[in-house]
Amino acid sequence: MASREIAGVTVEFDDDNFMADHTAWNEAIAAELANEEGIETLTDRHIEIVQYFRNEFESIGTAPSIRKLNKSGVVPTKELYQLFPGGPAKKAARIAGLKKPQGCV
């Protein structure tokens, strides 16, 4: 594991560059992680989905898959790919400060 400073906070990251401790997360960290993922500005819609990811993680211990997101009605798959291009579940989980979703390569 490696630690680094992000948004003025020292945060531990695992070998896949996901936060090791989701409780250290805040929206300033999310904004910086989003920027690293090529998302310049987190909109209210981004935050809504990120919060859904965090709530699911708190409930079941893992970030939701794209399939679960699609079934939940929170966000259509097409919109999810527009908001988080190039691996939406993985990017959304990383921005949410969570571990890599199960099933992601």
Image (cartoon, rainbow, N blue to C red):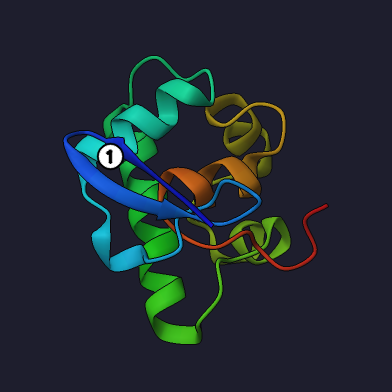
Q: Quadrant of residue 43?
A: top left
Horizontally, is 58 left or right of 89 in the view?
left
Which residue is labeled 1 in the image?
29
Counting from the top left corner in percent of width and height, residue 91 is at 57, 40
Three-letter amino acid code at disc 1? Ile
Residue occupying the point 45% across, 60% down? 53
Residue occupying the point 52% across, 28% down? 83
Residue occupying the point 71% across, 28% down? 86
Most foreground residue, 73 or 30: 30
Residue occupying the point 28% across, 39% down? 29
Neighbours of disc 1 within 10 Å: few (<14), some (14-19), many (20+): many
Counting from the top left corner in percent of width and height, residue 95 is at 43, 43
Counting from the top left corner in percent of width and height, residue 35 is at 42, 21
Horizontally, is 44 left or right of 69 in the view?
left
Most foreground residue, 38 or 73: 38
Q: Quadrant of residue 27?
A: top left
Q: SS for tag 1?
A: helix
Q: Quadrant of residue 88?
A: top right
Instruction: Residue at the far left: name it.
Output: 8
